[in-house]
Image (cartoon, helix red, strand yellow):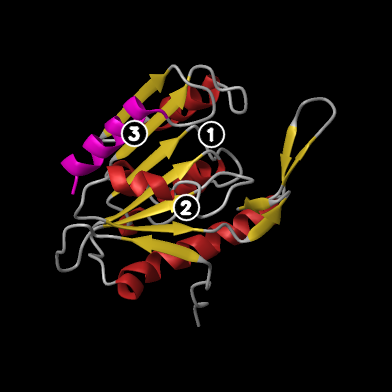
Amino acid sequence: MPSEAPSWTVRVVGPQQETPAPPLVVLLHGIGADEFDLLPLAQSLDPRCKVASIRAPHAYYGGCAWFHIDFQRDGSVVPDVPQARAVLADLVRWVEAAPTRFGTDPQRTFLLGFSQGAMMSLGVLGTVPERLAGVIALSGRTPGDLFPPTAPTEAIARVPLLVAHGTLDEVLPVTHGRATRDAFAPISRDFTYQEFQVAHGIIDTELALVADWLAQRL
């Protein structure tokens, strides 16, 4: 018997323009933040969208995290692999249950993740692409060996994917964005990659790209 979707804290806004079974945009914040961090983005997205911002389930130094990471003295970053994979499984169940829970169109669920949230969004893409209409991964990194894809490559390739990264990012250098590009561009049928002159954050021109990309795929 499959497990139920987790009861995480979620903030929901919209749609600003009432429509039956609206598209759903799920916001996945970065490590050390919370469900309010990305919520202001909602006002810049297509008014037809219902937007749900999830609070990651684990406490992390005054904020929240999808999974814990340890920073080693040699500069390496070590993730809690069992915790990461467990929370990905929970997030997949949450995404699968979301259209029924929020009254949205099951064919139009989009994920928008920032930093660690971007990594989670790509993990969901590699697991249940059939549940997604598109993924936006900002300032993140490729899931790599942490979330090896389990879905067929052809199914992953059908999901539109936007990857953006800051050239001045000091937390996750732009090489991570380029690695994600190199991993997905060869297989994706609808792939967009762009770099912005910004540190570890989102600037107005990047948000404009996100809003336009999303509107074109609703």
3 or 2: tag closer to the N-terminus: 2
Q: CA distance from mark 3 to mark 1?
A: 19 Å
- 136 sits to left or right of 88: left
List x then y, in percent, for residue 56.
57, 57
Q: Reply above or below: 37 against 85.
A: above
- 71 sits to left or right of 65: right
| Mark sitting on residue 207 | 3
Q: Reply above or below: 73 against 21.
A: above
Q: Element at badge 2?
A: loop
Whether residue 186 appears in this view of the structure is no
Q: Residue furthest right?
A: 73
List x then y, in percent, for residue 45.
27, 45
| Mark sitting on residue 141 | 1
Amino acid bearing label 1: Arg
The span shown in magenta is: 203-218
Picture residue at 22% right of the left edge, 65% below the top: 105
Picture residue at 52% right of the left edge, 66% below the top: 9
- 100 sits to left or right of 141: left
Q: Reply above or below: 128 against 146.
A: below
Q: CA distance from mark 3 to mark 2?
A: 31 Å
Residue 209 among magenta residues:
yes
Say which of 183 and 95 sits in front.
Answer: 95
Picture residue at 61% right of the left edge, 61% below the top: 57
Mark 3 residue crowding within 10 angstroms, few (<14) / some (14–19) / many (20+): some
Marks 2, 1: nearer the viewer = 1
Marks 3, 1: nearer the viewer = 3
Amino acid bearing label 2: Thr
